[in-house]
Image (cartoon, rainbow, N blue to C red):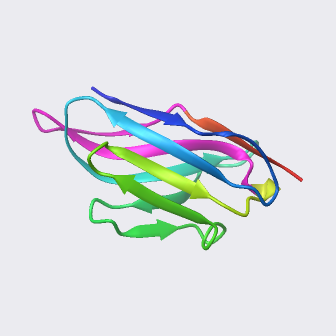
Amino acid sequence: QGQLVESGGGLVQAGGSLRLSCAASGSILRINDMGWYRQAPGKQRELVAVITSGGITNYADSVKDRFTISRDYAKNTVYLQMSSLKPDDTAVYYCNADIIYSGSFRQRIWGQGTQVTVSS
């Protein structure tokens, strides 16, 4: 069906900012929730933030007041604005979306991941 393409990762110093983007492609009828997860070396993948089709957001406690998730519904794109970054935020960040395609085919898919590295 479709795919999620992420961009915006990189290397930043502690206290800095980065903005991640994730665009969904394909014959999309509707996207329900879109979210960001991350996985650090040796750790399980964890939820960072999620935004519903209605714009309701939810954040992990560790990123509240530092990260902001938003969506551009017309572009089928979700963003993650990350500020006051800490070395503990270093991880591969993955986009995830619950998508309904033409023909009413529904699929939850993952992006390929983008590396975020925060130096101390």
Q: Position of residue 79 (x, y in %)?
A: 47, 51
Residue 102 belongs to magenta span:
yes
| Residue ID at (89%, 53%) | 120
Residue sitting at x 73%, y 64%: 84
The answer to whether residue 71 of the structure is visible from this angle is yes
* Front one among 114 and 37: 114
Q: Position of residue 83 (x, y in %)?
A: 67, 61
Q: Position of residue 39 (x, y in %)?
A: 65, 46
Q: Which residues are magenta?
A: 89-112
Looking at the picture, tell me which residue is in the foreground, 39 or 23.
23
Left/right placement of residue 47 relative to residue 100 reads right
Query: Which SS type dominates the magenta stretch?
Result: strand
**Quadrant of the image containing the N terminus:** top left
Up the image or down, 31 lies above or below 82; here it is above
Side of 93 where 5 appears, left or right: left
Q: Is residue 42 above or below residue 85?
A: above
* 93 in relation to 101, above or below: below
Q: Residue furthest right?
A: 120
Left or right for 95, reference 72:
right
Outermost residue toward the top in this view: 1
Q: Is residue 36 magenta?
A: no
Q: Nearer the viewer, residue 11 or 58?
A: 11
Q: Residue at x 54, y 42 (%)?
A: 94
Q: Nearer the viewer, residue 11 or 110?
A: 11
**Would residue 83 appear left or right of 113 to someone viewing this image?**
right
